Image: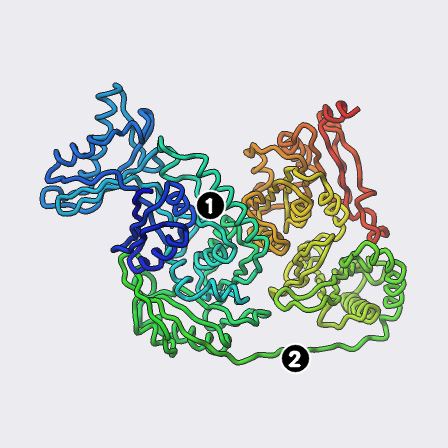
Amino acid sequence: MRAYFATCPKGLEYLLRDELAALGASEVREALAGVHFHGTLETAYRACLWSRLASRILMPLAEFDAADEDALYDGVAQIDWSGHLAVDGTLAVDAHGGSEALRHTRYLAQRVKDAVVDQFRDRDGARPSVDTREPSIRLNLLLRKQRAMLALDLSGTPLHRRGYRVGQGEAPLKENLACALLLRAGWPAIFAAGGALVDPMCGSGTLLIEAAWIAADVAPGLQRRYYGFLGWKAHDGEAWAGLLAEAKARAQAGLTALPARFFGYDHDPRVLEEAKRNAQQAGVAGFVQLARRDVAHLERPAGCDAPGLVITNPPYGERIGRQEGLVPVYRALGARATAEFDGWRLALITSDEGLARATGLRADKRYALFNGALECRLYTFALGREPAHRPPSDAPLSPGAEAVANRITKTARHLRKRLEREAVGCWRVYDADLPEYAAAIDLYTGHPEDAGGPDVTYLHVQEYAPPREIPEAVARTRLNELVRGAGQALGVPRERIAIKTRYRAKGGSQYGRHDVRGEFLLVEEGGLRLRVNLHDYLDTGLFLDHRPIRLRIGQSPRGLRFLNLFCYTASASVHAAAGGAAATTSVDLSATYLDWAARNFALNGIGGPAHRLLQADSMQWLEHDRGVYDLIFVDPPTFSNSKRADDFDVQRDHVRLLQLCARRLAPDGLIVFSNNNRRFRLDATALPDLAVRDITASTVPFDFARNPRIHQCFELRTAAAVEAAG
């Protein structure tokens, strides 16, 4: 057992004391901006890995008088540094405090460094070098009243740097302070009772991510790749490996059971994008719902019936905004919180008591905290709300749709037994079966994501471009008849039918503007839950014609490494992961679709670093990737001309794309290549090192049989692997 000291922001000492005791530390006592404790080296490692509140974990090495620079140098030189640092290692020194004779911390750090390296040079003729970023060891010197205390910094870098933050707002909240707010606000108990968390001014998402990690039992240091003890000569690698293995298992179990009950809003789209990236990096994007919304329009998320927590770090005039201009923001926060959140709690941090009073609420608790050097207070409140209701609507059936209704009824009757036998809940009902009614109709069985309840039927109608000789008015009438006939045949009311219409514009017939509803359904496929959106995008998030391909991927051998290029919402990756893939990598250029993909993973209890979601142009990413994959699924668009990537044409570029895939393929691996360009021709002669097999016929679902050209699909293996297999 030996002594340690954990530093923390002022105001967190008592919370940190209790946390360290819970982690197994003994003789725990608080001090100014830190906590003393005793334990084994493993105890200190556990504190580095699991403390949500500490800034650094220091292991004292020596304490001595340092009246002047020579005494400081001599005191450091008395330590045998060969037991801590290799001659070819690196070090850094942080110095704090001072005395009458020694006032400059940079000079103090220099003298400590000199004493260490001179010892090596005198003994070995060589010396360690300095690395201020990630040294083999980092030393911490505190000088008070001519008394020097020298410690080894086991954390290496501040522990609030979890490793997930890739972006931050104007006034970022440090991660350990965010955890203190959550603990003071009672978040662990609220979550355990089924409550959700809402941050109405979420910025870069720190409160949301830390709340999700607390709820999922994710060690806050699990994603950190550097600690100050990793290059230390006395490092116990076996003990550290055991702690990491335990933390990974707990995180996997926690993320598997974690519900998606975290909601963040902000008026700034830039910081929302940063929040998305941070949540993705933290592995919790699928559990966090983010939306652009100002405080004046704050609403309780649908389906969140248990009392939860509204918590936020609003602007308070010190860095962004001015106090007088912020009063309406706080007033709106108080009003909306009172109106919408019955039985919930509200918590906010501010340095200005007047702004807290502007909410119009009476705080039941106040806690003094420091955000950096700024003294603040956390205020907590009890809340109430007024309910809101949405009246349902319905639409009558048009007699002109009788032929459509009869056709759809016949199709549904013909496919019913197979649909039930194979548990297919999303399928193509109609595909221009009657030429004058030119549209595709897909049926989705599911329920709203934010409401739950029993599954019901929804229809997604996608109009095909009518012939030019058909007048616009006639085309509109036929579409209306089609919608009414389908609704009658399948018993689906008009409010559960989404229609994607086309309009004539310069350059040809195009799809009209889509709604922006943000309404998602949860549907099931192969025992997995997936999100679809029938209104807001051209496609719904789930390509129904790829159902057999996804099911086949999910039945692949366990333990494979799966790569999904142009992954869209990564439903194929979810199937792969659920089927036992050891790792999945999903690449897409769209942050929106990657966020959607993360939610799909979360819906099925799948998360963690083994399942990567990468925002990148797939072609460019392949050029630089060095991974090896057993199964690569690539389903590129026919054309793409994104401003953030090179133009892509599947006919022109497929050879290069498949060559790049082949470079990343394991020796006995498989590429599944699909696209929906009906005129596509695969140039097998340009791929002499790959054996190509057309599997299109086996990948077109039975409900698409009347339109077998919906896509083309190929299997490609290395020619050497095919030859070896005989």
Q: Is residue 56 above or below residue 667?
A: below
At a point 53% along the width and 49% down the height, the residue shown is 250
Q: Nearer the viewer, mark 1 or mark 2?
A: 1
Q: Quadrant of the N terminus?
A: top left
Q: CB atoms at circles 1 and 2 under 8 Å apart?
A: no
Secondary element type, mark 2: loop
Q: What residue sits right under mark 2 in the picture?
A: 391
Secondary element type, mark 1: loop
Q: What residue sits right under mark 1 in the picture?
A: 222
Q: How is the image coloured?
A: rainbow
Q: Nearer the viewer, residue 691 or 227?
A: 227
Q: Nearer the viewer, residue 481 or 472?
A: 481
Residue 175 visible in the current orientation: no
Identity, as a three-letter code, of the amino acid under mark 1: Leu
Q: Between marks 1 and 2, how big is the CA–CA gap? A: 48 Å
Q: Judge left or right: residue 646 versus residue 140.
A: right
Identity, as a three-letter code, of the amino acid under mark 2: Pro
Q: Which mark is residue 392?
A: none
Please report whichever mark, 1 or 2, sits nearer to the chain's N-terminal start.
Answer: 1
Q: Is residue 590 above or below residue 417?
A: above
At a point 43% along the width and 71% down the height, the residue shown is 346
Residue 669 drawn at (x, y percent): 69, 32
